[in-house]
Image (cartoon, grey):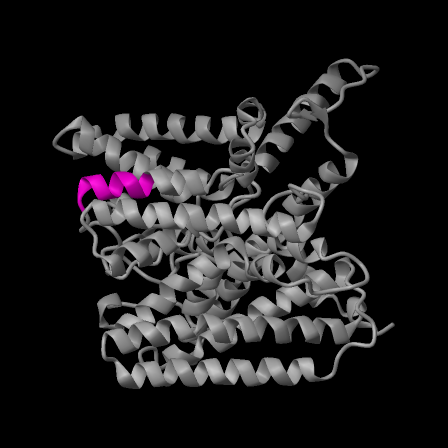
Amino acid sequence: MNIGIVRFIIGWMLEFEAAFLLLPTLVGVIYREVRISLVFLATSIICLLAGFLLKQRRPKRRDLYTREGFAAVALSWLTMSAFGALPFFLTEEIPNYIDALFETASGFTTTGASILTNVEALSHASLFWRSFTHWIGGMGVFVFIMAILPLMGGGTTINLMRAESTGPSVGKLVPRVKDTAKILYEIYIGLTVIGTIVFCLCGMNLYEALTIIFGTVGTGGFSIYSDSVMRFSPLAQNMITLFMILSGVNYMAYFCLISRRIKDVFAIEEVRWYLGIVFGSGAIITWNIHKLYPNIWDSLRHAFFQVGSIITTTGFSSADFDRWPELSKMILVLLMFIGACAGSTGGGIKVARIIILCKTIRKELAVMIHPRVVKKIKVDGRPLPHETLRATNVFIAVYSFIFFSSVLLVSIDNFDFTTNFTAVAATLNNIGPGLAGVGPTQNFSLFSPLSKCVLIFDMVAGRLELFPMMILLAPSNWKKY
C-alpha cells in the first residue's frame, strides 16, 4: 500500500470540505445566526488546516492503483463524515457526537436516515448543511475534485471514480477521466438548476427549493420539515417525483441525449427495465391503495411518489406508507433492494445487477436442459465480460454477508424483526425510512450507539458499493511497498 498517496488524497478532500462548509456559514449570516455561522467557519478552518498538514509531506511515489484508490476513497468518506459532524456537535444542536456522525454520514451517503425528533429545531445553516451533504455525496466528492484538478501521476485516476461511482462497471464517457468527471457534473448541476427553478415555480421559496433539490438530485431524502414533503402542494410533489425518477436514470442516457444520439438512449437495456419497474410498481400500488384516498389522482400521486422515492433510494415521503396494505409495503421493500440504475446517484443493488442475475439464471436453466448449448449473456446487445459477471456474483455474496451480519448485530437492541430488517435495508441501500420503528414518521434515535455505528458502516459501505470498505478492513492490503 502506498500510504503516502492515500494521506495526500485525504488532505485534498479535507480542503474541499473546508470550501463546502463556507456555504452554510453564509446561510447563517443571511439568517443572522451569528454563533452558528462562527462554528461552521471554525470547522472550515479546522478542515483546511488538517488538509494542509496531510499534504505537507508530498508522497515519494504517486502510484494510484485499485488498492490505493479504494482505500483512499473509503477513508476519505469516513473522515469527511467525522469532520462534517463537528458543527452539529459544537453548536449542541445534536449534543451526542455519535448521533451527529450518524446524521452526517447519512447525509453524505445520500441515505436520509435521521435521528432527529424535531427537524425544525435546527438552525437554517445546519439544515442547509444537512441537505447540502446530499448534493456533495450524490455524484461524489472525488468526481468533483477530478473535474477541477488533475490529482495523480502513476496508475490511473479512474480507480478513484470506480471506488466512488455506483454500478457493476464504471467506464469513461470520453477518453480522458477529467473530461468524463466534468460531463457528469455538468449534467448534475444542470438538473439541480432546472429543479430549483421548477420548485420555485411550484410555490417553494428559494431556501426550500434549494434544500429539497439537493435531496432530490442527490437522491438523499433529508427535508427541512419533520413531515418530509407532505406539506408541499400536489403539483410540487409531482415535480419532486419527476426529478427523483430522472435522478435514478443512468447518466450515460443523458450523455447520449446531449450528444444527440437519441437511438442510443432507447438501446440502454437498464433504463428500459428501470422505467418498466417504476411504472409497473406504481400501477399495482395505485390499484392497491385507491380505497385509502378520496380519488384516483391522489392514489396515483402518492403511489408514484413513493415508488420513485424508494427505487431511487431518495427517501422522501408524501404519505405514511407504513399504513398502506401489505402488498404495497412488500413491493416497496423489494424496490429498496433493487435500487436505481448504475451510473446514477441512487443506491441499492442496482437494476443492472438485477438484469445480469436474471439472465444468469435463464442461462443456467438453458444449460441444465441442453448441456451442450453455448449461450452468451448479453446486455445492450453486447456479450457481458466474464469479469463483470464474476464481480456481480461476488457483490451479491458480500452484500448478503454484510446485510445479515448487520441485522444480527442490531438485534442486540431487542427491537422487532421488521424494525431491524428494514433499518439495515434502509441504510445499506441508502434509502432512509424503513417500516415499523423506523417508518416514514419515525426515526433512528431508538437504536443504541453500537447499532448506530453498525448502521453508519452500512451507509458508507452501501454508498461505495461495498468493496472499498472491504479493502479498507483487510490487514494484508496495508503492507507498505
Looking at the picture, how far across and down is residue 20, in whole percent?
Answer: 46, 70
Front residue (pair 365, 60): 60
Left or right: residue 193 versus residue 341 is left
Numbered marks: total: 0
Percent of width and height locating residue 29: 28, 78
Residue 148's place in the image compared with 450, above or below, is above
Indicate whether 10 appears above or below 41.
above
Identify whether 80 is placed above or below 334: below
Query: 424 or 10, which lies in front?
Result: 10
Magenta stretch secondary structure, dominant: helix
Identify the residue at horizontal 68%, vertical 51% (top origin). Answer: 177
Quadrant of the image for the C terminus? bottom right
477 or 43, nearer to the observer: 43
Q: Quadrant of residue 383?
A: top right
Q: Residue at x 27, y 71 (%)?
A: 124
Q: Please provide percent x and percent y for residue 26.
A: 34, 74
Q: Identify the residue at image location x=18%, y=51%.
A: 231
Q: Which segment did they paint magenta?
A: 233-241
Residue lying at the far left of the rendered structure: 294
Establish if 108 lies above or below 308: below
* Residue 224 in sight: yes
Q: Can residue 411 be seen in this snapshot?
A: no
> What quarter of the picture does the N terminus occupy?
bottom right
Percent coordinates x, y for residue 439 in the rendering: 32, 53
Q: Residue at left 21%, top 39%?
A: 235
Q: Is residue 46 left or right of residue 384?
A: left
Q: Is residue 236 magenta?
A: yes
Give the image quarter of residue 79: bottom right
